Image: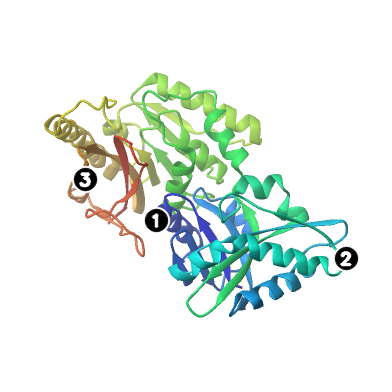
């Protein structure tokens, strides 16, 4: 079947996460926040529940050439998808199909198209409600609260150069669950800066380990976000470490919280130590995946000049170098390392950490991210407009 995936704000990360989980894909559409692929099998909802960066998934049901055919096709599809007893609810979202002009045209007509579909359905004395939004797409919140997955349909329209694809949403991101994972944890540390759970989930998935047998280590565990996301993905062998005993205790508290609310029985091994000293605590070749946000440095005030920021990154690079030296002594053959390091914004430009050559010194080779936009050093950049500290995501393998 053909399936569509609506990707989140960090599109390149979300696409990389998805392909890390499902493997190489055959793109039909690969534009803006949309990825449509051929030859997908399995349950999309189950797949979606493991992902951090995908907003919606669905199945492509039809292809038409014009708006007139679109209205007829959607009206004909509706009774085959849901029971039409009582009031039938539906919504129409227009996403990119790779053709900018047709996207603009269809989005300007999206509400009128919905009304025409509604009128056509009502011709058979069907009670119909059109669910609309102030923007041309329905959010996950609207789809969920209007129960369009259970008692209605969201039709997703993708205008391409030579056709219009019609899809039906199968799953949307569980915004309540992600809100709980982020804001209801007992231990949070906004002052130090916390790895967002969605980003942690994406990084664990990009590491592409086998949760049933691989050992995953977070050597800068902070409040334990990587570990709890790995627990949610089924990892059974987990290790967390941090130089700060307060951070280790915070991780333990968040792990307990995750275990209690999900009946998860995993108990990560916890170590209080510098990352540079982990070879003292862990056996050689005992770690298969390292996923971590490395120490981001002192909190920014915004008053720092470029020389001060460059000095901070140089100091951090010394720590990172020694950490990779320690990693080389504990990882297994072909181990993968997925890390986030800081990139400082200063006067409109970005100062990155040049970590790739340091990792190579200890036998770690950069694994390039394909079919996405990366920095000149091969990183996926995560951040929002106005942030002073961005995150650069790298993927390495031990050679």
Q: Which residue is mark 1?
A: 12
At label 3, counting other C-alpha atoms closer than 10 Å, the crowd grade (few under 14, some 14-19, many 20 or more) is some
* Whole-percent x, y for residue 245 in the image: 39, 20
**Horizontal side of residue 150 vs 17, given as left or right:** right
The image shows residue 237 at horizontal and vertical percentages of: 50, 41
Question: Quick check: 297 left or right of 205?
Answer: left
Q: How would you rate the neighbour count of disc 1 (Cα within 10 Å): few for under 14, some for 14-19, many for 20 or more?
A: many
Q: Nearer the viewer, residue 69 or 80?
A: 69
Question: To which residue does mark 3 refer?
Answer: 355
Q: Earlier in the sequence, mark 2 or mark 1?
A: 1
Q: Is residue 289 left or right of residue 173?
A: left
Q: Nearer the viewer, residue 120 or 233?
A: 120
Q: Is label 1 in a helix, a strand or a loop?
A: helix
Which of marks 2 and 3 precedes in the sequence? Answer: 2
Disc 3 to disc 2, C-alpha distance: 66 Å
Hey, which quadrant is residue 190 in on the image? top left
Disc 2/disc 1 C-alpha distance (Å): 46 Å
Question: Which numbered dot is residue 125?
Answer: 2
Q: Quadrant of the C terminus?
A: bottom left
- Outermost residue toward the top in this view: 246
Q: Is residue 303 above or below residue 151?
A: above
């Amino acid at each position: 079947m053909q399936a569509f995936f609506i990707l989140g704000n960090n599109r390149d990360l979300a696409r990389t996460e998805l392909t890390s989980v499902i493997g190489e894909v055959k793109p039909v559409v690969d534009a803006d926040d949309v990825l449509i692929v051929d030859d997908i099998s399995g349950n999309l909802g189950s797949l979606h529940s493991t992902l951090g960066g995908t907003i919606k998934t669905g199945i492509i049901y039809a292809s038409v050439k014009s708006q007139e055919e679109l209205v007829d096709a959607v009206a004909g599809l509706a009774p085959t998808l849901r029971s039409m007893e009582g009031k039938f609810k539906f919504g129409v979202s227009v996403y990119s199909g790779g053709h900018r002009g047709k996207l603009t045209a269809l989005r300007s007509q999206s509400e009128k198209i919905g009304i025409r579909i509604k009128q056509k359905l009502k011709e058979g004395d069907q009670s119909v409600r059109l669910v609309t939004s102030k923007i041309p797409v329905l959010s996950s919140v609207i789809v969920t609260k209007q129960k369009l997955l259970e008692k209605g349909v969201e039709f997703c329209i993708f205008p391409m150069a030579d056709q219009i694809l019609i899809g039906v949403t199968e799953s949307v991101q569980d915004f309540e669950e992600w809100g709980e994972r982020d804001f209801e944890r007992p231990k949070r540390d906004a002052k130090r800066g916390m790895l967002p759970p969605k980003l942690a989930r994406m990084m664990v998935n990009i590491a592409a380990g086998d949760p049933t047998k691989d050992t995953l280590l977070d050597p800068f565990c902070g409040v334990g976000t990587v570990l709890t996301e790995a627990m949610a993905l089924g990892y059974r062998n987990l290790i967390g470490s941090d130089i700060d005993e307060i951070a280790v205790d915070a991780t333990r508290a968040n792990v307990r919280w995750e275990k209690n609310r999900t009946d998860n029985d995993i108990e990560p091994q916890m170590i209080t130590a510098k990352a540079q000293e982990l070879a003292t605590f862990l056996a050689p070749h005992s770690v298969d995946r390292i996923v971590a946000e490395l120490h981001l440095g002192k909190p920014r005030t915004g008053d720092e000049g470029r020389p001060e920021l460059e000095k901070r990154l140089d100091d951090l690079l010394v720590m990172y170098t020694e950490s990779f030296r320690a990693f080389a002594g504990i990882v297994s053959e072909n181990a993968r390392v997925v890390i986030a390091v800081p990139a400082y914004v200063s006067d409109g430009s970005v100062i990155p950490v040049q970590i790739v050559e340091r990792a190579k010194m200890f036998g770690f080779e950069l694994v390039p991210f394909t079919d996405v936009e990366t920095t000149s050093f091969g990183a996926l950049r995560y951040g929002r407009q106005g942030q002073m500290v961005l995150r650069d995501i790298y993927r390495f393998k031990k050679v």
